[in-house]
Image (spheres, grey):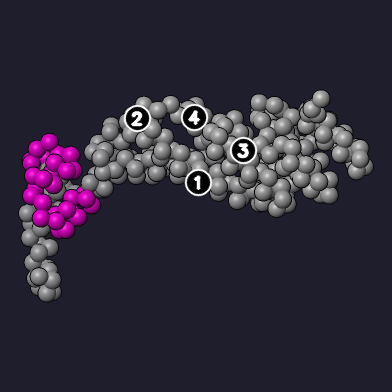
Amino acid sequence: MELNLTQILMNEAVREGWTEWMAAVRAALSRTDLKRPATWTGLETAAHAHGHMVRLTELLRKHCPKPDCRKPEEAGYLVLVAYHPDNRSTGYVTDALEAYVRTKDRDGVLLLCRVVSVIGTRGEYTHLNSVYNLLAGYLLRYRRERMKEYRKGAEPWLGEADLQDVGRYLPELEERSFADRVAAALPEAKSVEALARECGCALNTFERRFKEVFGETPRNWLAKQKARRIRSLLVGTDMTFREIASDCGFVSDNYFWDFCKKHLGDTPARIREAYRNTRKTYGGE
């Protein structure tokens, strides 16, 4: 009969003489609730036994390379290893993360978000910084790809509720992710409402979140972006004023000219003329 993970580890503990420590680990696992980090203290204490942890990590790498987070014991071993500040342990956690991402295992990814949030933010566990960076890269890339897949009608493997959990665990990542989504929506999104739709937010939620991340209202920010683009097109292309107005989302020439006078200080014609005269003066033409 095939042995389960606990039996394999206990057999090795008996053979190598660390049954007492293994009994303490199993007791800590029985008290561990993966959703309540306050119950992880027993695992943190057990992880101080460096020699035993090195051997346990070797066995887990062989017999449990991708812990099944639907099985509390396997997921608990992953948390235990995360508490051990050793390159071999960090490598095991990193390999588990890569396996979770490769197989689109939402439970595994969310557990590691929680682990990094709880353990990695403490000064004595800086070994998890590399795991955080890798996890952040995956999730930021997923955010961008998710929008593309969503537009194609594909079902995302991390839902909106999952991403809200990610935001609670990793608030800095959420800010970067939100900023990335806003940047990706330009220049196609011509209005605040369009930006909110592209970012998958209700308008009120989007405006509140935007001000938290960027420090100003989305309307002011969008006006600045639009003004920069208009100036760039006026001085850097031969597009007609009507073409520029259309490209920047203006429904009439009058609105376009009024915007230029308000935000760029002059009419489109004078801005272009002033730029060309400056180039002639300095030998640019």
Residue type of the residue flagged with mark 1: Gly
Q: Residues within 10 Å of mark 3 (few under 14, many from 20)?
A: many
Percent x, y for residue 198? 33, 34
Residue type of the residue flagged with mark 2: Lys
Separation of residues labelled 2 and 4 (CA atoms): 14 Å
Q: Earlier in the sequence, mark 1 or mark 2?
A: 1
Percent x, y for residue 118? 65, 39
Residue marked by disc 3: 112
Residue marked by disc 1: 137
Question: In the orientation shown, which residue stands out farthest toward the bottom?
Answer: 283
Using the rendered view, name the quadrant where residue 68 is placed: top right
- The residue drawn where x is 86% and y is 34% is 10
Residue marked by disc 2: 152
Residue marked by disc 4: 157
Percent x, y for residue 264? 17, 52
Question: As drawn, is 39 to the left or to the right of 224?
Answer: right
Question: What stretch of residues is rendered in magenta?
Answer: 227-255
